[in-house]
Amino acid sequence: MPPSVEDRLRDILEAITEIDQMLPGIRFEQFTEDEMRRMATERYLGVLCEAARKLPDHIEQDEPDIDWRKMNDFGNRLRHAYHEPDAAIVWDIIQNHVPRLNSFVRTRIQTAGK
């Protein structure tokens, strides 16, 4: 049986949780110097992007402030140009875009449970 929408939302939330646990108190300079942490973060972002890519359109339409297309494009870059991710772009995504996605996914999961 293929993953449900709820499964994909939980996958996104789990990836965000893992990223958050790896980066408490980490500054950009530390992030760029720690290849293992950076690579693990990119892997979790890849999981997040893949799960988001497979969400139905009506879910994406519920949160137009999230740039779903850009997220999909970034996921493609992680999958196909894995040697090129720019640490500054990854850091920007973590700092400025993942929190909004986190909030949206948590709300969707809570709403689905009611």
Image (tube, rainbow, N blue to C red):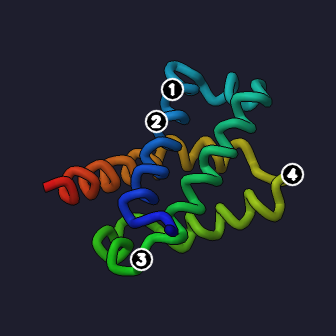
Q: Secondary structure at mark 2?
A: helix
Distance Cα–Cα, label 4 vs label 2: 24 Å
Q: Are marks 4 and 3 in contact (CB under 8 Å)?
A: no
Check whether the beta carbons of the residues at disc 2 and disc 3 lie within 8 A of each other: no
Q: Which mark is residue 68?
A: none
Rendered-image quadrant of the C terminus:
bottom left
**First-in-chain label (4 vs 3):** 3
**SS at circle 1:** helix
Q: Earlier in the sequence, mark 1 or mark 4?
A: 1
The reply to whether the C-beta atoms of the residues labelled 1 and 2 are less than 8 Å apart is yes
Q: CA distance from mark 1 to mark 3?
A: 28 Å
Q: Which residue is disc 1 drawn over?
A: 21
Give the percent coordinates (x, y) of residue 113.
19, 53
Specify the label residue 17 is tagged with: 2
Type of the residue with mark 3 = Pro
Q: Alpha carbon of mark 4 to alpha carbon of mark 3: how far?
A: 30 Å
Residue furthest top as drawn: 25
Alpha carbon separation for disc pair 1 and 4: 24 Å
- Look at mark 3 in the image and give the residue it sits on: 56
User: Looking at the image, which residue is at 59% across and 62% down?
Assistant: 50
Of the image marks 1 and 3, the number of the one nearer the N terminus: 1
Q: Residues within 10 Å of mark 4 (few under 14, many from 20)?
A: few
Q: Is residue 37 above or below residue 68?
A: above
Residue lying furthest front:
1
Q: Residues under labels 2 and 3: Cα distance?
A: 23 Å
Q: Secondary structure at mark 4?
A: loop
Quick check: 58 above or below 54?
below
Residue at label 4?
A: 83
Image quarter of residue 88: top right
